[in-house]
Amino acid sequence: MPTDRPTAAELVEAVREFLADHVAPNVEGQLAFHTRVAVNALAIVERTMAQGGAMDAAELSRLKDLLGRDGDLAEMNEALARAIRTGEMDDQGAAVLDHLRQTALDKIALANPRYLTPRG
Amino acid sequence: MTADMTKSKAEKQTRNLAAVLRRRAGEVYGPGTEIDGLMRLSGGASRETWSFDALSPDGHRVPLILKRDPLNEKRDETADSQFGGAKVLLGVDRWTEGRLMQLAGEVGVPVPEVPFFLDADDQTSAGYVMQRLDGEALGRRILREDAYARARPKLAFQCGEAAARFHNIPVNRLPSLPSLTAAEALDYHQDVIDAFKQPHAGFEYGIHWLRERLELAGDRLTLVHGDFRNGNLLIDGEGLRGVLDWELGQLGNPISDLGWICIRAWRYGYYDKPVGGFGEVADLLDGYQAGGGGQVPLERLRFWEAFGCLRWGVVCMIMAFTHIEGRERSLEKVSIGRRAVEGEYDLLQLVD
């Protein structure tokens, strides 16, 4: 990637901080709500840039074990989805479920890490 | 458009609506009825909600709410829309929605009364008018605020009882509604996911699991509310005051409503209370039995809770693709797409 500092992650962080610290306190109603939504969306992008690569590598490695072959992540996920639908994975149900739970956990860690924390 | 032009257009719309309401309220509450305090509450793209009081000539004041289709938009009468090639069920029309509330009220379900309807004409879009009840519908507040502390422990039972009653409305009394058996509902969700061309192993696993257990679903087909959850329930200090938002009413499996109110998305973080973040499954099912719904096996409830998780995930995806496919560009909608994983994660915890 032909870039100098700031990195893409640093730019996204700066925009998020601008929205959170300078826009959000000065708007109200729908605009305030949408500003919070925008801040959250940028936080997802930041977490994805920081952790997404390692998560992808781990997911691909699990998919290779499950499917017993190689390929890129999108193609392997499509193959797994198809194999689940046709019942080809039924005899590996527990291993598939472990993999899917881990993958969903990673996706939550990127999308909304607070989802798993109870309140009240 | 300048802000002034927007403002004057909005004022003209409000004046026109006041005239329509005065005429219709006059027919219901007597000639000379006036409209007071007409005010737009929500600016949603798909619905308009207005608040007003009808003042009858004898000085009687009736607090009311109008829910109507957006102006200047011809409604798609099929109530379907093409999403990447899949038909998406978008809900019933305003007359049907109001009619379902009337029918539910007749069998003892707490609902706002629906005194009259608006037909679409050159003055207004179609809508229905309901009683404006006091209470709180925001899920988080219901779970957090002291004012509802006494109500919360009663809600699961009351919700079960209310659901049993509207599930028991004879089907031949219902207006025309979309109808989906459990198997059809599963096919529908699979078709919608396929249309997004984003192969999804997690939801695929859940669909496969549900398909293999279809016999658990039960085969009753009744009126279902379709969005029966914390967030569409009006609560006051004493308990359940009204079941709101009937626009996803349909003929379906009754236990789908009970599964839906249990999914984690509607617990707002209060995960130790499986029913809406306020109550226990045993109370929900006791209420259901007391209301005449019979005994619900836990396995059947689990099936429909898992189904509800799938449905929540698909709803999130539909929102995201509404933006992605350019139907309505919206930061809020596209962001909700990332909440699909909440449904996926919860579904994968429920299955084995």
Image: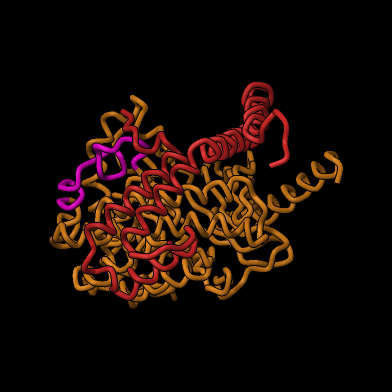
**Can residue B347 be seen from the camera position used here?**
yes
| Rendering colour (chain A) | red
Quadrant of res B235: top left
Picture quarter with the C terminus of chain B: bottom left
Q: Residue drawn at (39%, 74%), measured in percent from left and top?
A: B187
Q: Exactly how many numbered labels are in the figure? A: 0
How has the structure been colored for display? by chain
Q: Is residue B229 above or below residue B294?
A: above
* Magenta stretch encompasses residue B268: yes
Left or right of B126 on screen, residue B168? left
Q: A54 or B331, which is in the foreground?
A: A54
Residue B102 placed where, x, y %? 41, 61
| Rendering colour (chain B) | orange
Name the outermost residue toward the bottom: B172
Q: A41 or B162, which is in the foreground?
A: A41
Q: Is residue B35 above or below residue B188?
A: above
Magenta span: predominant SS is loop
Q: Residue drawn at (74%, 53%), measured in percent from left and top?
A: B16
Residue B305 placed where, x, y %? 28, 56
Q: Residue drawn at (39%, 38%), measured in percent from left and top?
A: A115
Residue B91 placed where, x, y %? 50, 65
In magenta, the rendered stretch is B267-286
Q: A11 or B296, which is in the foreground?
A: A11
Left or right of A7 on screen, residue B253? left
Q: Is residue B4 above or below residue B216?
A: above
**Can residue B170 be seen from the camera position used here?**
no
Residue B330 placed where, x, y %? 64, 49
* Magenta stretch encompasses residue B37: no
Q: Is residue B45 above or below residue B201?
A: above
Left or right of B152 on screen, residue B327? right
Quadrant of res A88: bottom left
